[in-house]
Amino acid sequence: NRIKRYPHYQALSEKADLVIMTDDGTQGDQVLRQLHNKSDQILFLRNGLELMEKDVPKMVAAFDRAAFRSKLGIGADDTMFLTVSRLTGWKRVDRAIDGFADCNKKNPHTKLVIVGDGDSREALEKQAEALGVRDHVIFAGAVQHDAVYQYMMACDIFVSLYDLSNVGNPLLEAMTLGKCVVTLDVGDTNKLICNRQNGIILTYTMLPLLGDIFSELIENKALRDRLGSHAREYALANFCSWKERMDKEYMSVSKLII
């Protein structure tokens, strides 16, 4: 890859007055160190969140959760799992479907909603069909960003099992909305999620147990609520708005000019 993407690697190794890099959990700061980047300043920033500028409790209180779920065909007694991503290979939505299928055998009052679209959608639909859960898996397709919040507020459990990192905005938004999160320990995901304290974080060896973990969360609402509450507490203490994030960048750039 260094040969194929030589200009990219060369740029990352060049000394600069300021390097600005997004902290998306893929450990880009380690790449800079491994390339012996000697820049004067490295600004490693996580994305901002629009939700941090909203009155989330008021937003949740005003949301008609029952009506939204009813439109999706999800009953009041159903447990709703949710994934949000582009439907492409490394996002590994197939893992969520596998775990859900195992769980659904014991817990038929469950639905998995998949928000997003992409080149893997047809394969994922066939997977759900082959596993006998097609009637329980809802492919919502691509939706407007504000509508994603509605899906998150409607769900009981948010699932993110990407291959490279799970520190993307969907996970951050789910935590900010106080959702119980199930995710995979890759990249810097474990810097945000502490297992069974503010979410469930799995190693690769634990993936075969995903269905059992889903079942445990269905049966133990108190655990779900506690994990979701602690996720929101972490979000409020550690995440920032887009304005706050851009202000940090602006101040760093301004110092170079003055």
Image (cartoon, rainbow, N blue to C red):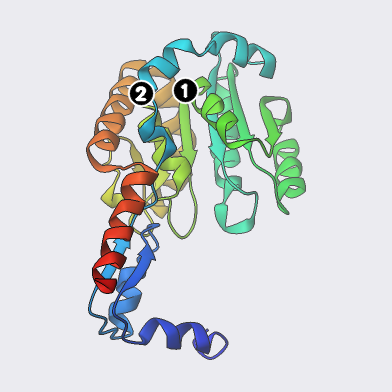
Q: Is residue 74 left or right of residue 19?
A: right
Say whether residue 197 is visible.
no
Q: Residue at x 28, y 40 (%)?
A: 195
Of residue 174 and residue 239, the one placed in the foreground of this image is 239
Of residue 204 and residue 145, the one placed in the foreground of this image is 145
Q: Looking at the rendered structure, which numbered label has been put on residue 224?
A: 2
Q: Is residue 242 left or right of residue 110?
A: left
Residue tagged 1: 156
Residue 190 appears at what percent x and percent y?
Answer: 29, 51
In this picture, is 151 found above or below 256?
Answer: above
What amino acid is at disc 2? Arg
Residue projecting furthest to the front: 258
What amino acid is at disc 1? Asp
Q: Is residue 65 left or right of residue 200?
A: right
Q: How many marks?
A: 2
**Do the CB atoms of the residues marked 2 and 1 lie less than 8 Å apart?**
yes
Residue 156 appears at what percent x and percent y?
Answer: 47, 23
**How far apart in space, not on screen, are marks 2 and 1 (Cα)?**
8 Å
Q: Looking at the rendered structure, which numbered label has been put on residue 101?
A: none
Of residue 22 and residue 165, the one placed in the foreground of this image is 22
Q: Earlier in the sequence, mark 2 or mark 1?
A: 1
Where's the C terminus, which quadrant? bottom left
Q: Residue at x 30, y 28 (%)?
A: 227
